[in-house]
């Protein structure tokens, strides 16, 4: 077993005691860092950066060089999986991700197949292995994937959407077709995450960014049920260590008990849920990750520290909390404010443990 020197993140996920509350940030490697923009320019485009294991390693390590973060996250994107299914991913400046060939016709859906992670997504596995080597024994590496439903939103809408009217119309009119897409996606994501684990990812996270746009019944049937299948199929122990799994449904604060019941080790919370109340609801079934509003990082450092302390105090004493934002960091965030956040988490959580 290759235990990281700083394994606070892995211990907190398993609700074991830690000396401080571990912290990492969703999208910690990204456009708010000038060095990221520089590497991206060298790569040519965002996808060229993702496809180059050396450069993906470089940007993964950039936030760790600046801040005292307790985990690294693979630099990649959730949409690499539908891209590998042949949908043709591309990015338009200011408009976000798009697909050249979104799923529209029944025959296209019937022809959909899961990619082989060792072939079409080899570049991701190479990046995972390379990042693990570069991290040495410093901090653990998180692997990730989109949820089957969130991937399907982009695959069917063809890009970002305000109202998800194409996928939701399919959900109500042709649930059989949507279930078919979700089944393929669930198989693809399970194989993809297991390949990441075998390549060296020490924890995995499922990003269900759009599950919260569904009604409760639809969430259960079209998002949660497929995440449960994935969790059931994950490798839970690798290299002599438990590989914890985090499920993050943005807007899922009302469904915590149901999410906890699918067998994940931790739930990611967005900023709209009180973390103390969430903890009471899930009890000792899962750890919690979150949940500072990313926009707090635009306030002054003293205010950031105050908001950090409020979240740590709301969670209370005892283990099982991983500090994070409630969603990805904004590209306009001042990097010095991230430093203020990280030191506030470490300082205040150490103090909490001395009481
Ligand atoms: O957290 C990390 O540092 C790891 C890397 C990571 C990225 N995307 C890098 C990225 C992760 C975990 C993701 C997940 C992701 N990608 C999600 C789920 C989480 C969420 O934010 O809700 C989603 C929905 C996507 C799809 C996607 N990719 C979007 C919406 C965008 C932004 C497009 C834009 O122009 O604003 C991307 C691109 C992307 N993924 C960037 C980064 C750093 C910025 C691209 C760039 O450098 O131009």
Image: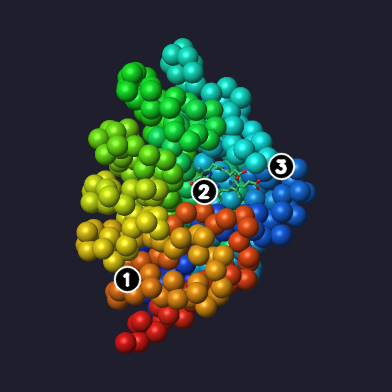
Please tell me in which quadrant of the rendered image residue 80 appears: top right
Q: Residue furthest top?
A: 107
* Vertical relation: 325 (above or below) 336: above
Image spot of residue 327 (x, y percent): 47, 54
- The reply to whether the C-beta atoms of the residues labelled 2 and 3 are less than 8 Å apart is no
**Mark number displayed over residue 45:** 3
Which quadrant holds the N terminus? bottom left
Task: Nearest to the eye among marks 1 and 3: give it.
Answer: 1
Identify the residue shown where x is 26% and y is 39%.
216
- Mark found first going from the N terminus, 1 or 3: 3
12 left or right of 104 in image: left
* Front in this rendered view, residue 285 or 201: 285
81 left or right of 59 in image: left
**Mark number displayed over residue 314:** 1
Asked if ligand 1 lies within 8 A of label 1, the reply is no
- The reply to whether the C-beta atoms of the residues labelled 1 and 3 are less than 8 Å apart is no
> Secondary structure under badge 1?
helix
Identify the residue shown where x is 32% and y is 66%.
320
- Mark found first going from the N terminus, 2 or 1: 2
> Secondary structure under badge 3?
loop
Please tell me in which quadrant of the rendered image residue 334 appears: bottom right
Asked if ligand 1 lies within 8 A of label 2, the reply is no
């Amino acid at each position: 077993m290759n235990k990281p020197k700083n394994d606070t993140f892995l211990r907190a996920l398993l609700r074991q005691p830690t000396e401080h509350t571990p912290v990492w940030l969703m999208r910690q490697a990204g456009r708010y860092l000038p060095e990221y923009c520089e590497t991206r320019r060298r790569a040519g485009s965002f996808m060229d950066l993702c496809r180059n294991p050396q450069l993906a390693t470089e940007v993964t390590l950039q936030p760790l060089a600046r801040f005292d973060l307790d985990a690294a996250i693979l630099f990649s994107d959730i949409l690499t999986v539908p891209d590998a299914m042949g949908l043709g991913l591309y990015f338009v400046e200011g408009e976000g991700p798009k697909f050249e060939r979104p799923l529209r016709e029944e025959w296209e859906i019937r022809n959909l197949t899961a990619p082989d992670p060792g072939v079409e997504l080899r570049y991701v596995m190479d990046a995972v292995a390379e990042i693990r080597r570069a991290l040495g024994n410093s901090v653990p590496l998180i692997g990730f994937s989109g949820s089957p439903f969130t991937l399907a939103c982009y695959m069917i809408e063809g890009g970002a959407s305000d109202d998800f009217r194409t996928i939701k119309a399919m959900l109500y009119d042709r649930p059989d077709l949507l279930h078919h897409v979700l089944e393929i996606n669930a198989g693809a994501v399970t194989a993809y995450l297991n390949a990441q684990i075998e390549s060296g990812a020490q924890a995995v996270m499922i990003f269900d960014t759009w599950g919260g746009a569904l009604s409760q019944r639809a969430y259960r049937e079209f998002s949660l049920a497929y995440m449960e299948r994935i969790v059931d199929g994950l490798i839970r122990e690798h290299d002599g260590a438990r590989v914890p799994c985090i499920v993050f449904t943005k807007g899922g604060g009302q469904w915590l008990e149901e999410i906890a019941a699918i067998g994940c080790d931790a739930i990611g919370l967005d900023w709209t849920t009180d973390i103390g109340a969430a903890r009471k609801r899930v009890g000792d079934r899962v750890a919690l990750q979150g949940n500072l509003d990313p926009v707090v990082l635009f306030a002054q450092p003293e205010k950031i520290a105050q908001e950090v302390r409020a979240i740590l105090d709301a969670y209370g004493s005892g283990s099982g909390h991983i500090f994070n934002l409630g969603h990805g960091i904004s590209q306009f965030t001042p990097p010095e404010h991230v430093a203020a956040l990280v030191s506030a988490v470490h300082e205040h959580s150490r103090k909490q443990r001395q009481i």
